[in-house]
Image (cartoon, rainbow, N blue to C red):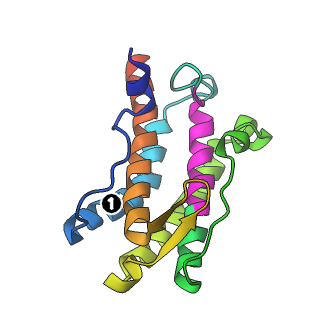
Amino acid sequence: MDIEKLKYPVGKFQMPKEMTPALRQNYLDDLATLPEKLEATISSLNDSQLDTPYRPGGWTVRQVVHHFADSHINAFCRIKLVLTEESPTIKPYHEGLWAEMSDYASMPVSQSISILHGLHKRMVHILSNLNEAELEKYYVHPEYGKTFTLDTVIALYGWHCNHHLAHISELKKRNYWD
């Protein structure tokens, strides 16, 4: 199988040319439903399956679930920074190194699922109540040398939900785990 398709089963992120209210709502719906969808997607998996990489050289399902929690915690903090500071420069983190830590290797995925349930309720609540001016506020990402508006953050993390859910779903299909 094509390694790029394994890496990006829903395609690479592309910011829409125009963020319409309907499109924004679709992304917010993806954020709102992630915890339940993720929980349903992994509910039948045993520890051996959770510890299976979704692609050669990729993270295990367990690592992906814990990554969701860490990545979205960072996103939530960045959203709060944007709304309380003037164009903040955020601190990047090394997600690959985080994925090598002991919590990713051995903790039950239920711990990260619990985090995601509350975190996504709060994140979606805040993002759903922004006005047009607030949606244009941004942070600076020093690693990429570019700015990310809150509208972009909504689209990016909506995509991120589907990106990693597809990693797990496609692995389950390939291995006939359903």
The spot of residue 89 in percent (x, y) is 62, 70
- Viewer-closest of 123 and 145: 145
> Could one spot residue 178 in this view of the protein?
no
Check disc 1 and give the amino acid type: Tyr
Residue at the image point whose x is 39% and y is 36% from the top = 166
* Residue 146 appears in the figure: yes
Determine which residue is flagged by label 1: 27
- Within the image, what quadrant is residue 46 found in? top right
- Name the residue furthest right: 102
Question: Residue 8, image x and y in percent?
Answer: 40, 34
With 124 as the anchor, is 117 left or right in this view?
Answer: right
> Does residue 49 sit above or below 107 in this rendering?
above
Q: Residue 117's spot in the image, x, y percent?
A: 52, 61
Q: Is 108 located above or below residue 4 in the figure?
A: below
For disc 1, the neighbor class at 10 Å (few under 14, some 14 to 19, many from 20) is many
Where residue 22 sits, quadrant-wise, is bottom left
- The one nearer the camera, 89 or 106, is 89
Residue 61 in magenta?
yes
Residue drawn at x 59%, y 84% is: 85
> Would you say residue 116 sits in the magenta stretch?
no
Residue at horizontal 56 percent and vertical 49 percent from the top: 68
Query: SS at mark 1?
Result: helix
Main secondary structure found in the magenta portion: helix
Q: Image point 41% across, 26% down: which residue?
A: 4
Boundaries of the magenta span: 58-74
Q: Quadrant of the N terminus?
A: top left
Question: Is 167 in front, or is 49?
Answer: 167
Q: Is residue 137 left or right of residue 62?
A: left
Please state the horizontal and vertical placement of residue 19, each as a whole percent of the image.
25, 66
